[in-house]
Amino acid sequence: MNQIYAKLQLILLIYLVFTIFFCTDSYSNNKFSQYEVAFNSQSDGIMLSGTLTVPDVKTRVPAVVLIHGSGPENRDLEFGEHKLFKDLAEYLSSRGIAVLRYDKRGVGKSKGKFVPYDLDNYKLDGISGVEYLKSIKEIDKLKIGVIGISEGGIVVQMMANSCSDISFAVLLGSPGVWGKDFFYSSQLAMTKAAGFNQNNINEMTGVFNELWPLLTKDKLNSDEENQGKVLLKKLWNYIDSESKNDLGFTDSNIDFFFNLYRGDLVRKYYNYKPGEVLSQLKCPILALNGDKDVQAVSQINLTAIKEALKNGKCKRYKILELKNHNHIFQICKTGKYSEYKEIKGTMSAESLSIIEKWINDITKG
């Protein structure tokens, strides 16, 4: 009896060894190396500091550069205790994809000065990251892509349109429309998520339509400037109080935000048309949005992205809306900005898996 039991154990051991060595994904060992790196921007030569994670495998691997959304973000893209880019990078690198993430210019260890909506420099910073990856011996130079979230989606569109070395692009909660349509759809979604009724929504729409010309006009007199600040404060009243506080939308910050929205760089891009750029892209594209995203509303933006790609030069694209996901791809209830910090974990397993499988699929062979 003991001999039979011993033989069964041996057979089971052989089966397990065979399964581990021959039947598992070669990237499922979850091992990768991490390096502190630096590279210079093509824009003005400033040094950008970042982290490179590289899978511990013997073959050359595909790679991506992560592109931030708006704001002075560091390489990990932090929301409270959440570190979205760190988690995304480590997930991808544990599954065969090298990832470069870096501090925005003027943030963390990167040199230079952070300037909001400095999209031309952000584009060149990102392209410089692509160039840096081409110098890494472990990386397949023909399989380098970019992933951009929120405003970073616009930067990725601009990068892919001007850099032929980008072999694929992933747009996460990316604008497909811009200017008035984008900002109104976001305000509307936040107003609805806060539970305001239709009369309130109509009032908010009136305030927004009065404010918009004052944000886009070249020059304002003192009366128009004062009127604009009053209208901006009114607009904030149609957002839930907790999200308002988390976003910094307080009376003491009214001058800062009004001047931010009227800055030369942001007004330059109020007229940016994502569809015109997207229609020119040829590399494979994956676009994801959460159906509860209140910052880049899924319906209007994904529809526009799909239409532009369908009628453009891109031959391989995938458009997905994820149910019960917010702007940073957490599984959520309301999608409100104030909810981000209350949810345990960052990007959902579903969203991470979709991104990883898509990248590994298109870079196969």
Image (cartoon, rainbow, N blue to C red):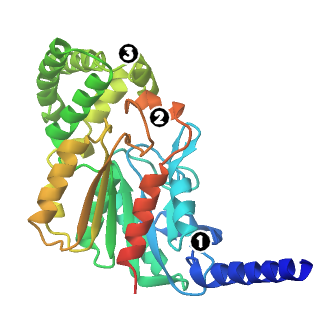
How far apart in space, not on screen, are marks 2 and 3 (Cα)? 23 Å
Marker disc for residue 340? 2
Mark 2 element type: helix
Is the Cβ of the residue at disc 1 closer than 8 Å to that at disc 3?
A: no
Give the class, few, some or many, for how many residues have Cα within 10 Å of label 1's Cα (few <14, many ≥20).
few
The amino acid type found where label 3 is placed reads: Asp
- Camera sees residue 242: yes
How far apart in space, not on screen, are marks 1 and 3 (Cα)? 51 Å
In which quadrant of the rendered view does residue 67 lie? bottom left
Residue lying at 17% horizontally and 47% vertically, measured from the top left: 177
Of callouts 1 and 2, which one flags the residue occurring earlier in the amino acid sequence? Answer: 1
Residue lying at 32% horizontally and 37% vertically, measured from the top left: 292
| Residue labelled with disc 1 | 28
Which of 312/355 is in front? 355
The amino acid type found where label 1 is placed reads: Ser
Relative to residue 81, is residue 85 drawn left or right? left
The percent coordinates of residue 318 (x first, y second) are: 26, 63
Q: In which quarter of the image is the C terminus?
A: bottom left
Residue lying at 51% horizontally and 45% vertically, measured from the top left: 346
Mark 1 element type: loop
Relative to residue 114, is residue 110 drawn left or right? right
Above/below status of 251 relative to 316: above
Q: In the displayed image of the protein, which residue is found farthest to the right?
A: 2
Give the class, few, some or many, for how many residues have Cα within 10 Å of label 3's Cα (few <14, many ≥20).
few
The percent coordinates of residue 90 (x first, y second) are: 57, 61
Marker disc for residue 251? 3
Relative to residue 144, is residue 86 drawn left or right? right
Above/below status of 39 relative to 200: below
Of circles 1 and 2, which is in front? 1
